[in-house]
Amino acid sequence: MARKLSAEEEQVVRQLANGLAEAERQQLLADLADCTVVPATEDGARLQFTISGYQRPPYHGQHSYTVGGSMEDADGTAIGVNLYADENHRILELELIRWGDGPLLKPNWSSFRVQY
């Protein structure tokens, strides 16, 4: 079911946007203002974005933005944070990669740090 980003999720995307070139940052923030997400995995580790009024092109791959991040899971396990765009450079997906055994537990959003 589609939903708005949580305040923590939105803050992470905004922090990532601050590390981008101005035109790319502006487009990302515009997309962020008019999107919803759908969890693509049971544990919520991957969120797929839908931008209101935007028709995605047929899928021909995706690319990550030039900045990423990291944070900790509830048990202290490291989580990699990647944000992806479609071929038109429009926000596509937010992925949290748990670097340990088991599914994502409860990300500690306050531990998020941008990595360039």
Image (cartoon, grey):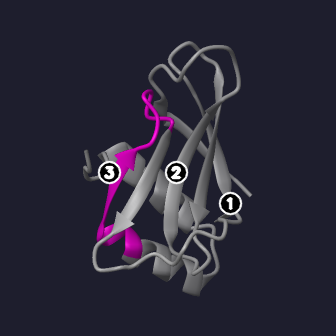
Q: Give the range drawn in magenta.
A: 31-45
What secondary structure is marked by label 2? Answer: strand
Please indicate whether residue 47 sits to the left or right of residue 36 in the image: right
Magenta span has 44? Answer: yes
Alpha carbon separation for disc pair 2 and 1? 12 Å
Q: Give the residue pinned by disc 1.
A: 67
Q: Which label belongs to residue 58?
A: none
Q: How many labels does the image show?
A: 3
Find residue 76 and report its image quarter. top right
Residue type at tag 2: Leu
Q: Of marks 2 and 1, which one's residue comes earlier in the chain? A: 1
Find residue 50 and report its image quarter. bottom left
Q: Which of 97 and 29 is in front in this view?
A: 97
At x 38%, y 44%, the residue is: 8
Residue type at tag 3: Leu
Q: Which of 27 and 44 is in front in this view?
A: 44
Binning the other alpha carbons within 10 Å of mark 1 as few (below 14), some (14 to 19) or many (20 upward) gives some
Q: Give the residue pinned by disc 3.
A: 5
Magenta span has 46? Answer: no
Please indicate whether residue 67 sits to the left or right of residue 91 in the image: right
Binning the other alpha carbons within 10 Å of mark 2 as few (below 14), some (14 to 19) or many (20 upward) gives many
Image height of 29 relative to 62, above or below: below
